[in-house]
Image (spheres, coloured by chain):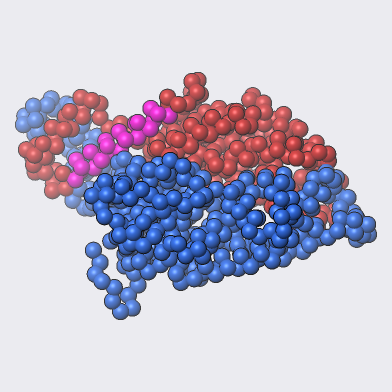
């Protein structure tokens, strides 16, 4: 099971979808689930709205959207022999309420569902498009927190097997997604530190998304500088049209952006624990996110992994 | 720069908008530069509009302090050292203040203010569930953010308050937080839970219910929860009244919302959603701020045509330029092709962005675009430079 997290806006859902497509293409049966019901995962597969009930979106690939109410209902169905009549009405409402107010219950309904899928081995790999960096530790730590808070009862019993799955590095890992920018890099470094320290689940990899291409080698850049000298630029305008100077400006902008991000990349590399794999996914300059981008991301991840 | 406001025209710039409002709430998806935008607007207002300006960040990322030269930004408002402004050759007309929402501390304050007596107060503050709920829950974060905004606004210390909101899972969470608090207390469930435990256990109607709940959650846990809510219920009238006030302040004409976004697909979708939600709730959308935009000219026809020429005729162009630049034609050809290709890449993105910006421009009277910065904002000068781009 892989929890894919990252600072908001870094493309965590796209990476989760890409990882799922990659794993499915390697013959694994994969479930990918979105925790924040924003619908972004459905966009990544262009498959229409997703529901709690997993739906096949590709060969060997199923997708679902988390919904704590449905998760609770499934939990009650599987673990308690509560007669149907008691499950509806006041009890369901009570538990909904408890789920929204009591510490960790909502989180455990989320994490528990994915753990359950892992335990039942319905799939070879479960990928969770998890909450953003700020909240993911709270989710992962929920079974431990509940275990401390709740003294007896079914919920406490349930936390034990979840802890076994989550705490086993062979079965559970976290993939932290970042972009080569200052704040996402800082949050990534911070989160990797918190994982393991605050909850016994550790990071398996960091994915750097939207890495801008290096346009020039050092020698080529010297050539580019010569093209930007007035005489050469004038000649270029004659040859390619009035807009040629702007084309050079755009290349200069691309070089500057890449350079400003190179510092963030090296900072990331320095501050992460040695041995933690770093995977790079290039900026795709795509028109919109969707299936096409997901497939490209899967291919890029595949190259990095192999 | 837009002209003076005349007649019935709506605000055309952020300067005009901020001069007319007391509260500006910035909202949008995570990672779009909300916090930086809020700080930049507050700094600009302090410099150009005068008065006491407070920027209240509720982003747990805690990055505002660095840019404002405040080492320890906390729940208590602190003034940004005026020397930072004069050092930049500026004479600000007003004062810039900053605070960061500390969820736990704000909840503790709230409980202290609302508790009917010392015993209830201490019992709540010491309850383990209370600590857990206040410290860990996004929803509680949203509520207390709105509550804190109301508090500083009611204090009358500030002419303008710029609030940076937490990256909510959905726009609704933040706006609905006060209302949800009211509903929560009015709900039948809290009444059921807080009814005397004994009578609940022995009531024939609810016995199976309690039994099942106990089996699932553990009896001790349920009674812990019950105790907590019994305590909390003693605060009900205070909470409900406050929630109603907070909601009134949000809907007041002195308050405006500023949707911040980038032009990437997901944040733009989120921004559109936010705009719709504000309209639905009859809240005032004052401006849309578009951050990290590529320059407009990338979409222009002349450079696009030139880039196409460079890509198609790279060899020919390199041949012509080899002499004057004294660079081997082969290397020149490679560079020319890379330049043309890179332009094509960026123009795909720039065109997509232009399309999305056009859609957003139909939603608000003020739409400002802040270009992609090569360097992130680190200090007050950077904040003001960014604010300058958005201001007029």
Res. A292 image quadrant: top left
| Residue under the point 55% across and 37% down | A4
Whether B92 is drawn above or below A245: the answer is: below
Main secondary-structure element of the magenta-colored stretch:
helix
Residue B62 appears in the figure: yes
Magenta stretch: residue A252 in it? yes
**Between residues B153 and B192, which one lies in front from this camera angle?**
B153
Chain coloured red: A
| Residue under the point 74% across and 36% down | A148
Magenta stretch: residue A265 in it? yes
Task: Say left or right for B276 vs B328.
Answer: right
Q: Position of residue B368 (x, y in %)?
A: 33, 59
**Between residues B189 and A54, which one lies in front from this camera angle?**
B189
Q: Position of residue B64 (x, y in %)?
A: 42, 46
Q: Start and end of the magenta stretch?
A: A246-268
Whether B46 is drawn above or below B102: the answer is: below
| Colour assignment, chain B | blue
**Between residues B392 and A49, which one lies in front from this camera angle?**
B392
Task: Say left or right for B134 vs B1.
Answer: right
| Residue under the point 50% across and 46% down | B74
Task: Say left or right for A186 vs B370.
Answer: right
Task: Say left or right for A255 vs A242.
Answer: right
């Amino acid at each position: 099971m892989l929890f894919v997290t990252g600072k908001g806006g870094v493309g965590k859902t796209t990476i989760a979808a890409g990882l799922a497509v990659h794993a499915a293409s390697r013959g694994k049966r994969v479930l990918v689930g979105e925790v924040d019901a924003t619908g972004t995962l459905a966009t990544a597969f262009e498959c229409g709205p997703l529901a709690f009930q997993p739906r096949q979106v590709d060969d060997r690939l199923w997708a679902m959207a988390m919904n704590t109410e449905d998760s609770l209902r499934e939990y009650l169905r599987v673990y308690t022999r509560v007669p149907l009549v008691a499950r509806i009405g006041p009890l369901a409402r009570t538990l909904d309420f408890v789920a929204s107010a009591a510490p960790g219950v909502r989180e455990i309904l989320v994490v528990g569902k994915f753990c359950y899928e892992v335990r039942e081995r319905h799939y070879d790999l479960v990928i969770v498009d998890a909450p953003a960096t700020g909240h993911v530790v709270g989710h992962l730590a929920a079974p431990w927190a509940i275990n401390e808070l709740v003294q007896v009862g079914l919920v406490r019993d349930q936390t034990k097997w979840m802890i076994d799955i989550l705490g086993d590095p062979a079965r559970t890992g976290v993939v932290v997604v970042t972009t080569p920018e200052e704040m996402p890099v800082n949050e990534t470094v911070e989160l990797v530190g918190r994982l393991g320290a605050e909850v016994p689940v550790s990071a398996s990899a960091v994915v750097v998304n939207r890495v801008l291409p290096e346009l020039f080698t050092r020698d080529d850049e010297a050539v580019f500088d010569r093209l930007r000298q007035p005489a050469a630029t004038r000649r270029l305008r004659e040859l390619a049209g009035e807009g040629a100077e702007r084309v050079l400006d755009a290349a200069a902008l691309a070089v500057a952006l890449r350079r400003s991000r190179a510092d963030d990349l090296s900072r990331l590399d320095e501050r992460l624990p040695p041995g933690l794999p770093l995977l790079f996914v290039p900026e795709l300059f795509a028109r919109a996110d969707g299936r096409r981008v997901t497939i490209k991301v899967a291919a890029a991840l595949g190259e990095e992994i192999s | 720069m837009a002209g003076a406001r005349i007649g019935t025209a709506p605000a055309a710039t952020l300067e005009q908008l901020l001069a007319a409002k007391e509260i500006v709430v910035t909202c949008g998806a995570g990672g779009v530069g909300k916090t930086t935008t809020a700080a930049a607007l507050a700094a600009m207002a302090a410099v150009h509009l005068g008065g006491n300006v407070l920027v209240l960040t509720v982003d747990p990322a805690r990055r505002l302090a660095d840019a404002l030269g405040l080492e320890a930004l906390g729940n208590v408002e602190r003034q940004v050292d005026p020397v930072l402004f004069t050092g930049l050759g500026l004479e600000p007309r007003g004062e810039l203040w900053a605070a960061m929402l500390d969820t736990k501390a704000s909840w503790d304050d709230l409980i202290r203010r609302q508790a009917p007596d010392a015993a209830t107060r201490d019992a709540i503050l010491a309850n383990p569930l209370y600590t857990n709920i206040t410290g860990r829950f996004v929803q509680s974060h949203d509520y207390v953010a709105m509550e804190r905004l109301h508090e500083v606004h009611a204090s009358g210390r500030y002419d303008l308050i710029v609030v940076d909101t937490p990256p909510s899972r959905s726009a609704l969470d933040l706006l609905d937080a006060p209302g949800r608090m009211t509903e929560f207390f009015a709900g039948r469930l809290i009444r059921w839970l807080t009814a005397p435990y004994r009578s609940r256990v022995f009531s024939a109607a609810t016995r199976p219910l309690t039994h099942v709940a106990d089996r699932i959650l553990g009896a001790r846990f349920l009674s812990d929860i019950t105790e907590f809510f019994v305590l909390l219920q003693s605060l009900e009238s205070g909470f409900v009244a406050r929630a109603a006030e907070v909601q009134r302040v949000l809907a007041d004409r002195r308050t405006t919302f500023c949707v911040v976004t980038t032009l990437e697909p997901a944040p733009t979708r989120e921004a559109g959603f936010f705009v719709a939600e504000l309209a639905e709730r009859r809240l005032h959308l004052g401006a849309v701020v578009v951050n990290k935009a590529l320059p407009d000219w990338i979409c222009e026809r002349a450079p696009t045509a030139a880039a196409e020429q460079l890509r198609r005729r790279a060899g020919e162009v390199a041949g012509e330029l080899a002499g004057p630049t004294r660079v081997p034609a082969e290397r020149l050809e490679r560079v020319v092709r890379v330049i043309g290709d890179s332009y094509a890449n960026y123009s795909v993105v720039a065109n997509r962005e232009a399309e999305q910006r056009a859609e957003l421009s139909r939603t608000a009277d003020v739409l400002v675009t802040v270009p992609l910065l090569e360097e992130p904002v680190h200090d007050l000068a950077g904040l003001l430079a960014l604010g300058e781009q958005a201001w007029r």
